Image (cartoon, grey):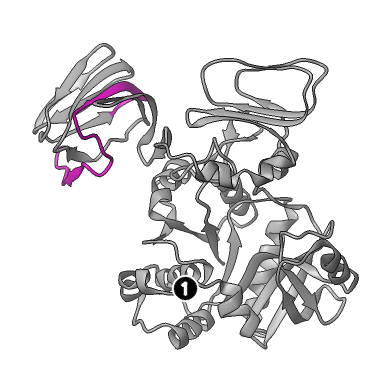
């Protein structure tokens, strides 16, 4: 079976832990049996593999998310990279073309599409298998998963089924309603549209060719910026006559806000947190190296990261986006394919960063035109290559790179260093990459 995980989101609704680089699905907040924490994307990927070890899983993601995916899922994870944001229909078509033209998937195989970030029970993944099997039968061109509503939500679209059976034809779709209308939909047996569906690969490619002028994956990728922004529901689902819905009554939560996210957390505190006994329904997530003390609070979320600090009533946190939009600040933390970095200090002509490289990984071999750099190794071992000169490095070693010189660092063990950037023009765009021939 083929599964496409849609990895959307720009990081506004779970600020300050998420940002333009680090979307919500990469925040490590779910504790595993071994005591370590995993992110939404890691949890979803692990659960899929546990139920169906042979599934081909492809993550449809933006360029800015690729490093985080590589870091959290490994270098072998399949990624369909969107050159820019174009809503769900172009993203799904691009990922489907990737499966057909790059991975060589049989056009008659079924494909299941689902978001990467819901909090779900184990039976959800059995349902994904059933969706794929229904699509493979070909009794309908499109098979949806309809979530049994737990309340009259205004946040979701609704699927109106024709019957009351586990599998039914679809009568109609309804956009996000007000609460009163949603209650009327539910009384008619309506289901939440959770954006989970399945089809035969050939079906969606034929539909795409009827709506978009392209020859194959590579042609589609090249002209992706010219495609109109349109959702899959508008382009396909609402136009399709041969369509079924399968009911799902298990646990399903859209972790889109702090309020819903904290409902799924098994712990009330993550990080260095103290809370007195008078606190009630309070969750604190602390990523900075100083303690947080909470006293006498009720129905509050506190979140602290290098990007900022949030203290909010849980319900009110759903309305934070306009305030976050007004914050114009460089992202202070990001995961890369080789590790991660955290900005410690920013001055007009300098920036200080703590860099962590995973064992066996390295930065790109690169240079900067407008800045010098100084690396101070604080833990671990590795080696540097600076203008083709190699040397081993250990804690306490200092490496200086003038503007224009080519450089990289390779970690033997986990390697931590302090990087100081010096120059009148410090920019993420000031970077030229080169082939690396020193393995």
Residue 413 sits above or below residue 340 on the image: above
Q: Is residue 129 left or right of residue 280?
A: left
Q: Is residue 375 left or right of residue 182?
A: left
Q: Is residue 22 left or right of residue 352?
A: right
Residue bearing mark 1? 93
Check if residue 253 falls in the magenta segment: no
Q: Percent position (x, y) of residue 262? A: 71, 38
Q: Which stretch is magenta? A: 411-439
Q: Residue extending furthest top?
A: 396
Label 1: element kind? helix
Q: Residue at x 58, y 80 (%)?
A: 236
Q: Depth check: give the residue in front, 333 or 92.
A: 333
Residue 4 sits above or below residue 343 on the image: below
Q: Residue at x 64, y 65 (%)?
A: 195
Residue 61, quarter of the rendered image: bottom left
Residue 181, quarter of the rendered image: bottom right
Q: Percent position (x, y) of residue 303? A: 61, 30
Q: Residue at x 80, y 22 (%)?
A: 279
Q: Percent position (x, y) of residue 357? A: 35, 30
Q: Residue at x 68, y 33 (%)?
A: 312
How crowded pointer 1 is (Cα within 10 Å; few <14, some 14-19, many 20+) is rated as many
Check if residue 433 falls in the magenta segment: yes
The C terminus: image quadrant:
top left
């Amino acid at each position: 079976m083929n599964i496409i995980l849609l990895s959307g989101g720009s990081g506004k609704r779970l600020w300050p832990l998420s940002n333009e680089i680090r979307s919500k699905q990469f925040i490590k907040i779910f504790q595993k049996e071994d005591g370590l924490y995993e992110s939404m994307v890691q949890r979803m990927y692990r659960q899929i593999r546990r139920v169906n070890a042979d599934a081909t899983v492809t993550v449809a993601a933006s360029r800015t998310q690729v490093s985080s995916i590589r870091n959290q899922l490994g270098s072998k994870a399949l990624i369909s990279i969107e050159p820019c944001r174009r809503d769900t229909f172009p993203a799904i078509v691009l990922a489907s073309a990737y499966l057909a033209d790059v991975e060589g998937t049989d056009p008659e195989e079924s494909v299941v599409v689902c978001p990467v970030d819901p909090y779900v029970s184990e039976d959800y993944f059995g349902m994904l298998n059933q969706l794929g099997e229904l699509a493979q039968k070909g009794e309908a061109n499109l098979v949806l998963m309809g979530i049994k509503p737990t309340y009259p939500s205004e946040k979701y679209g609704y699927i109106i089924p024709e019957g009351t059976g586990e599998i039914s034809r679809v009568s109609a779709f309804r956009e996000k309603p007000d609460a009163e209308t949603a209650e009327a939909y539910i009384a008619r047996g309506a289901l939440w549209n959770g954006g989970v569906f399945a089809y035969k690969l050939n079906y969606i490619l034929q539909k795409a060719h009827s709506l978009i002028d392209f020859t194959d994956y590579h042609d589609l990728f090249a002209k992706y910026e010219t495609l109109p922004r349109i959702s899959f529901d508008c382009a396909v689902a609402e136009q399709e006559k041969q369509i079924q819905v399968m009911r799902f009554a298990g646990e399903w939560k859209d972790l889109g806000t702090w309020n819903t996210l904290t409902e799924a957390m098994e712990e009330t505190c993550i990080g260095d947190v103290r809370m007195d006994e008078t606190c009630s329904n309070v969750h604190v997530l602390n990523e900075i190296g100083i303690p947080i003390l909470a006293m006498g609070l009720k129905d509050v979320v506190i979140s602290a990261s290098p990007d900022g600090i949030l203290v909010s009533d849980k319900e009110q946190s759903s309305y934070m986006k306009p305030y976050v939009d007004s914050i114009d600040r460089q992202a202070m933390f990001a995961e890369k394919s080789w590790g991660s970095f955290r900005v410690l200090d920013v001055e007009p002509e300098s920036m200080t960063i703590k860099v962590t490289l995973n064992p066996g990984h390295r930065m790109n071999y690169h240079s900067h035109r407008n800045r010098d750099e100084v690396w101070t190794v604080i833990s671990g071992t590795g080696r540097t290559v600076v203008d083709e000169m190699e040397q081993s490095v250990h804690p306490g070693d200092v490496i200086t790179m003038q503007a224009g010189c080519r450089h990289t660092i390779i970690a033997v063990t986990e390697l931590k260093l302090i990087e100081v950037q010096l120059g009148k023009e410090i920019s993420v765009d000031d970077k030229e990459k080169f082939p690396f021939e020193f393995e």
